[in-house]
Amino acid sequence: MSGLILDDISMRFDLPNGTSVQALKNVSLDIKQGELMSVLGPSGCGKTTLLNIVAGFLAPTEGKVILGGNTVTGPAQERGMVFQQGALFEWMNVRENVAFGPKMNGVAKAKMNETVDHLLDVVGLQDFKDKAIYELSGGMQQRVALARCLANDPEVILMDEPLGALDALTREKMQGLVLKLWKETGKTIILITHSVEEALLLGERLIVMAPRPGRIHKEYNLPFAEMGVGADLREVKKHKDYNQTREEILTMIWDMEEEIMGRTESAA
Amino acid sequence: MTILAIYIAIFVGAFFVVKAITTRLAARHDYTSLKTVTFGDESAITPDRVASVVSVVAIFLIWGAFTGSVITPIHAPGPFIGDATFTYTAEAVDGQKDDATVSFKVFEFGSVVEKDEVELGDGFAKNDSETVAAWRSKLIRVDKNDELGRKEGAKIVAVDGQPIQPGSEVSVASGKVSMTEKGTLNYKPAQGWQMEPIWLPSPEAVFKRVMRLQKEGYQNSTLMEHLGWSLFRVIAGFVMGALVGIPLGYAMGLSSWFRGWFDPIVEFMRPVPPLALIPLVIIWAGIGEKGKLVLLFLAALWIMTIAARAGVSGVKISKIHAAFSLGASKRQIMWHVIVPNSLPEIFTGARVAMGVCWGTVVAAELVAAEKGAGMMIMVASKFQLTDIVITGIILIGIIGYGIDILMRMAEKWLIPWKGRG
Ligand SMILES: Nc1ncnc2c1ncn2[C@@H]1O[C@H](COP(=O)(O)OP(=O)(O)OP(=O)(O)O)[C@@H](O)[C@H]1O
Ligand SMILES: [Mg+2]
């Protein structure tokens, strides 16, 4: 096992009307094993596209993704994915959802049950294991999604705004859970978010992307994730560097949004 | 017209009565009752079950009232039944007049009665007696037994003292008497407001007919056999249609080649009503069982194909992505994601298909069949056996409704997640 390498990735969408969108241009990243990386950027800067390429759902027009020395050619269980919502199987109960990966991969029943029980404990859903998905709250559903991803023991976990649809309080609890899982499992995690605070808290390494074409704008190495493990996240937010970095990034993104608006206005 | 007016009156009346009673009894305290805006809020409109019950009762009441049924206390005025008399005045050539009485026995349709013997009376015009069934009329040559009749040049000039001539009509106590161009009297007892059984039998007559049909059968099969055959054809046709249509729909949802190949066929066949295929199917497959199964197969096929195709297209791409990321193979995704995800659509399609098949089978049997509900009512209508026709229609409706209720129950049980994705 070794790191995840994004080697000079470009992605161009050719539209049916003849024009094309440069969603990503020359994105290179070297992500160490066990790294927790958050990705931030204005809407439409190619975050989802980037994650889909790493997951193997899209082939980049240029460049390649290498995990553990092997080039990624399609989705596989070594790269687990947690979606924003609606990706759980509502015809299965909580338990069956979490057991989906091991079952598909032919894991022995006893071992599978053990894994599922353990993970349901970790995400605190032991009492809900026989409930249907639609009987759970949004936060619980995302915990099921996390557990389902972990059940397969992937090397990398990709999350596209996993907490985007949750209310502030639930979201904070879930951020704590993500940190805990990261520390306990030592997985490589890439997390896309719209929230600057979330990116700061859940990123040892924080990437800010810029749009048109989508590219890496700035990179930070931050101490807050490490500080936040098992601690009160509100305390972490009081750290003076936290506020300073937050302001800096907010201004940066604000400027980018301004620029986009200005450009669309002059185009119109 | 009167019936429609009565129906509307019951509708409005029942509304106010029920509303008055329910508001008196208990004010509702659920969530909906707290909504102040219910107009246009579809979720606030639930069927009022009291209204449903009153609605069904009202239909039976009106049906009973206008057919003289025992199930209703009040009836619309029925036809005149019993003994009626009227007198006629004959005038001989020499101007002398004489009165005579005509006694009519008006009997219920279907019963057998004998003419009464009457005294002939005095004068040259003699008394007559005759029988007639309710709702019918009878021509009567009252002068036939007169001493001075038509042959002798005598004419009838009045009925019950009212002058009458050829082509005119007068009212008597129990009905009407008219005179034909040739001078024959035609007696028509009063018809009242009720429907003649041959137009609309009473509810109990229909019920009795159901019992008799089941015991004695009609056209060589009992009622259950007729209905059973129809139902069997529907189920067999539907199952065949589903067995071919669902895989075809899946293939169309999963492969561009299948989609391209079958799209024109499916889109072309979809708007063709199955009834329009009956003549062609009869030409190709004959009027036997084979033709009917082919027809129902075709009726169900396109609906099920389209439902399955929509079910596959409706699967959220993130679910497929998630399954692939979890290491599922295409085959596993087919079974564990696409198929369950498409079940709600397929069930909706199945409900539509069953409805269409049930309608189609009856129509096909009307055209040609040896057994079946449609055949039963078709043959019965030729012999004016209205009670069998109505029996058939009611049972066809009940079975169709029953099928849909069963399908809905199965749906609730099998796919509880429907609409909650
Ligand atoms: N399938 C596609 N076809 C054409 N253009 C696409 C497609 N997918 C993405 N794009 C374009 O690529 C760009 C980046 O899209 P992407 O979804 O990656 O943005 P994002 O950063 O995830 O945005 P958001 O924060 O709103 O989710 C956008 O301009 C989008 O219009
Ligand atoms: Mg996105």
Image: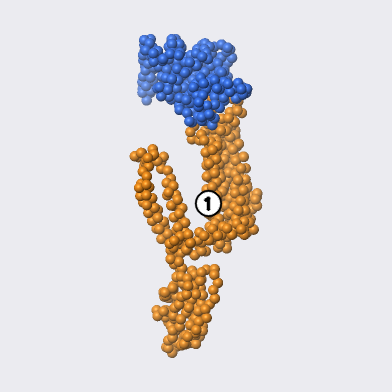
Chain colours: A blue, B orange
Q: Position of residue A69 (x, y in %)?
A: 58, 12
Q: Dot 1 corresponds to which residue?
A: B397
Badge 1 element = helix
Residue at x-position 51% and y-position 19%:
A122
Residue A258 appears anywhere in the view: yes
x and y percentages locating residue A138 in the rendered image: 45, 26
Residue that lies at the very extreme toward the front in this rendered image: B25
Q: Residue at x 55, y 60 (%)?
A: B208
Q: Chain of mark 1?
A: B
Instruction: Answer above or below: position of B229 versus B139.
Output: above
Figure quadrant of the N terminus of chain B: bottom left
Residue A14 visible here: no
| Residue appearing at x 45%, y 57% in the figure | B61
Q: Reply above or below: B363 against A231.
A: below
Q: Amino acid at mark 1?
A: Gly
The one nearer the camera, B271 or B55, is: B55
* Residue A256, horizontal then vertical, whole percent: 39, 17
Q: Nearer the viewer, residue B119 or B331?
A: B119
Compared with residue A86, is residue B305 higher up or lower down, i.e. above or below?
below
Left or right side of A233 for A54: right
Q: Nearer the viewer, residue A24 or A170?
A: A170
Report x, y in % for residue B16. Answer: 36, 51
Q: Residue at the spot x=43%, y=52% of the render?
A: B54
